[in-house]
Image (spheres, rainbow, N blue to C red):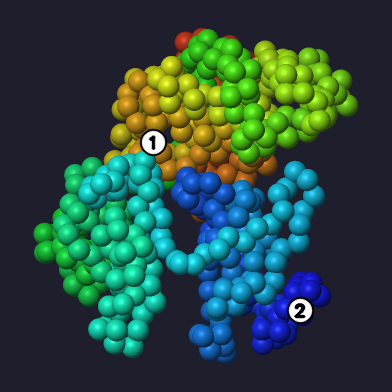
Amino acid sequence: MATAAAAAVSVANGVCQAYLESKHVRETREGVAELCRHFYTQGWVSGTGGSITMKVHDDSIPKSQQLIVMSPSGVQKERMLPEDMYLLSSTGSILCAPSPKPYPHKPPKCTDCAPLFMKITHMEMIKGIDGHGYHDELVVPIIENTAHEGELTESLSEAIQAYPKTTAVLVRNHGVYIWGDSWIRAKTQAECNHYLFDAAIKLYQLGLDWSTPSHDPIQRVFGHQRNTNMAVNAAVQNLNDAPEPSHRCIVLDIEGTATPISFVTDVLFPYARDNVGKHLYLTYDTEETQDDIKLLRAQVEEDLQKGVAGAVPIPTNDAGKDEMIASLVANVEAMINADRKITALKQLQGHIWRTGFQNNELEGVVFEDVLHALQKWHASGIKVYIYSSGSRESQRLIFGNSNYGDLRKYLCGYFDTTVGNKKETRSYFEISQSLGVDEPSDILFVTDVIQEAVAAKAAGLELIISVRPGNGPLPENHGFKTVRSFVEI
């Protein structure tokens, strides 16, 4: 429900209170929250995902007066709720803001979204566009449509001047203007064929005919010729002839499953332990490290109340830097030695490891069969996700800088302890809800930990236990299928 202050603002802007509280607005709020959660599970939209917007469609309201729902800045995408959203007028003024939440939640913030543009990064296709690589950010400006195409000249010119590296401009409710051949090269590179394949499958499921030019968005936008349609139709035919995969999704654990336990215990943990003090000193004043310290402080206060061994009090913020860091290092070392699966530790470890990977002091290690299995599953259309106690950032680092190169192109998303403890059934229920499968049994979870297998099985997932060198012994008659290599799956 809108607050009294929001109601006053709405009256001033000529928007009635009933519209603010209408079914259409509520459903749009829910839609943005759901969209943000899907972005999280897919690994899309780096950062917290602020300013994701959706217009409230209501046929009884003129388009020029329809409201805009915008996600807040600084809120984790997977934790966004409908009540976290901003309501904006069609001109961009804020009509209703979310109420602040108690610490450790940050105060809500609405990002200034003008001028509008689309940003894309960490996608395979980008490297086919001149001047862009996988890690670069491609910006495509968005301009408003006009009654006559010739009237777009001025706004097109302004967009190109504002974003000189772009080779395309989106026109709302009209289409896209593209110049140069870099987009066509990007779309036709061999390693990008799976994008065409995925698009073909979706259109095929909707009953659309790719052989008809009016139904071919690739040809309309990118100027592809008949051979594109032939290739895609062939791909769809191959899909019909191929056997149905037994699982739609595979969720993988990392340690002891995709990666040797020794890599974690003998390489990653010691690196974090040896470099935690150095990392805190060098980054102490950054917002990221201050957020890490807040999380650690909250965790340590809870540990002290429970009498957890190794927990020592962290001084107040007015204490000296040396004293503060010394207490943090003592707590982190105790947490690492106890192999605790807690978000505060894993988030800090991920930031420390990031520096190690950037400085080429670390390299991810995965078993050889992991590469072959990921390639096979990817080619079969099976979506693969990671669920690990390590942070999502550390997961990306391991697979993005592995001994077999960058494997992230085979992965569709990442889950960590923010979705829940790995030994709790609720966590796997949340994952199955996020992946949007018809049944939890459509998901295969592969782990080396029997307690995780039991929890996932209780949520309805299919299970396989990974037996790798160095893994702990399994109880007798555990009842789960085991494999010694992903090739067996």
Q: Is residue 258 left or right of residue 111?
A: left
Report the front residue among 34 and 17: 17
**Residue shown at 39% from the left, 26% from the top:** 401
Residue at which label 1 appears: 408
**Residue shown at 75% from the left, 43% from the top:** 104
Q: Is residue 206 left or right of residue 167?
A: right
Tell me whether circle 1 and circle 2 mark residues in contact (CB < 8 Å): no
**Residue shown at 49% from the left, 31% from the top:** 395
User: What's the distance in space between the residues labelled 1 and 2, CA to CA?
Assistant: 47 Å
Q: Quadrant of residue 32?
A: bottom right
What amino acid is labelled 2 in the image? Ala
Rendered position, 259 above or below 103: above
Camera-near label (1 vs 2) is: 2
Q: Under tag 2, what secondary structure?
A: helix
Residue at which label 2 appears: 7
Rendered position, 16 above or below 334: below
**Classed neighbour count for the residue bearing mark 1: other residues with Cα under 10 Å, few (<14), some (14–19), many (≥20):** many
State which quarter of the image contains the C terminus: top left
Residue 93: x and y in percent read: 61, 74
Q: Is residue 239 left or right of residue 477?
A: left
Q: Quadrant of residue 90?
A: bottom right
Rendered position, 187 above or below 203: above
Report the front residue among 56 and 181: 181
**Classed neighbour count for the residue bearing mark 2: other residues with Cα under 10 Å, few (<14), some (14–19), many (≥20):** some
Residue 261: x and y in percent read: 52, 15
State which quarter of the image contains the N terminus: bottom right
Q: Earlier in the sequence, mark 1 or mark 2?
A: 2
